[in-house]
Image (tube, rainbow, N blue to C red):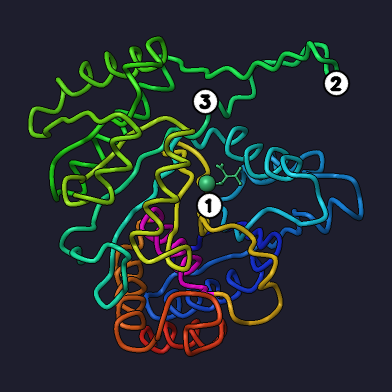
Amino acid sequence: MNTYKIAVIPGDGTGPEVINEGVKVLKAVSDRFGFDLDLTWYDYGGERYLQTGEVLPEGAVKDLEQFRAIYLGAIGHPDVRPGILEKGILLALRFALDQYINLRPVILYPGVDTPLKSKGPEEIDFVVVRENTEGLYAGAGGVLKKDTPDEVAVQESINTRKGVERCIRFAFDYCRRRNKGKKVTLCGKTNVLTYAFDLWERTFYDIAGEYPDIATDYAHVDATCMWMVKNPEWFDVIVTDNMFGDIITDLGAMIQGGMGIAAGGNLNPEGVSMFEPIGGSAPKYKGKNVINPLAAICAGQMMLEYLGEIDAAKAVEDGVKKVVSQDLKSLSAGRMGYSTSEVGDLVTDCIK
Ligand code: IPM
Ligand code: MN
């Protein structure tokens, strides 16, 4: 029997509640499909930081490197200044574990409401491949003459040929595996960011030459936002940098039915990957048993796929599809018609 060592970081806000439901579902599929999940829980997050002053303790990364994958709830606490936990935990792990891809599917499941009135599941089915270790997120830059009228702040976008190339190559490989629209769209801003996106563009067409079976397209990031709303069916795989990927995947989450269902994977195809719902810690819903756990459950499904447990992943996906089309009134917190734990039970019942 295969045993997978998984680190679980429930994190802040509603993270623990949604991760509990995700783990419930993962346990159900592992029983049914005959593999074992060896879970180790970590308390990294805002509470721990407020008590100890520590974001990630010494040795945390080395420790996490021993796992096959990390299952993460959410990082972000209302009593901690923005940036400390995000940079100290979430980005620190993405960078230290070299999770250079942030893979974010935008799929509208049957029965789910989208704000796009003329679009359905046929039209909304694409994946964003977001570069996850460089760009504006690299933290390059600095500040001069702080708190004076002459203050200068510089925040630079770092784009390396190696980083851009491995991301684009992943996008083409993924597009081939996905085997749907067979098209990769580069999302950039070549008309203004003429250094960074010149590198992206040249690399994109170099790599595209190795994939004659896959069509290419290009859209500026502002136009990408427009087309995602107007003609989402044009997209199959979108590849883009870290900042643009962050922004367009929130838009993607909305057109696929909201944060309640949007999941993502921080992938290091040669190392330890980390799966998370993309919606954040939603502190106002914390402890109320009203948050939608489906995004966390879908993140678990992506983790199963990554572990190679394809039948188990499919069973979770089918369960989610059934629950969204037949049971839930809405995907929004408090309006589902069920509590957080009941939604976890509904998916679990489909699996048993
Ligand atoms: C995301 C989040 C993070 C990001 C924040 C919390 C640092 O918005 O995962 O998309 O910007 O990457
Ligand atoms: Mn984001």
- Tag 1 secondary structure: strand
Name above or below for residue 237 compared with residue 19.
Answer: above
Q: CA distance from mark 2 to mark 1?
A: 43 Å
* Residue 90 in the image, given as x and y percentages of width and height: 64, 44
Please indicate whether residue 51 sits to the left or right of residue 113 in the image: right
Asked whether mark 3 lies closer than 8 Å to ligand 1, one says no
**Magenta span main SS:** helix
* Residue 95 in the image, given as x and y percentages of width and height: 59, 33
Q: Which residues are magenta?
A: 292-307
Q: Nearer the viewer, residue 159 or 247?
A: 247
Mark 2 vs 3, N-terminal side:
3
| Disc 3 versus disc 1: nearer the observer | 3
* Residue 42 in the image, given as x and y percentages of width and height: 72, 58
Q: Is residue 3 magenta?
A: no
**Which residue is under mark 3?**
134
Residue drawn at (40%, 43%), measured in percent from left and top? 248
- Tag 2 secondary structure: loop
Please indicate whether residue 316 sits to the left or right of residue 150 in the image: left
| Disc 2 versus disc 1: nearer the observer | 2
Q: Nearer the viewer, residue 337 or 312?
A: 337
Q: CA distance from mark 2 to mark 3?
A: 28 Å
Mark 2 vs 1, N-terminal side:
1
Please indicate whether residue 338 sits to the left or right of residue 203 in the image: right
Three-letter code, disc 2: Asp
Mark 3 vs 1, N-terminal side:
1
Three-letter code, disc 3: Glu
Q: Nearer the viewer, residue 191 or 299?
A: 191
**Which residue is under mark 1?**
69
**Which residue is under mark 2?**
147
Residue drawn at (82%, 59%), measured in percent from left and top? 47
Residue drawn at (48%, 77%), measured in percent from left and top? 25
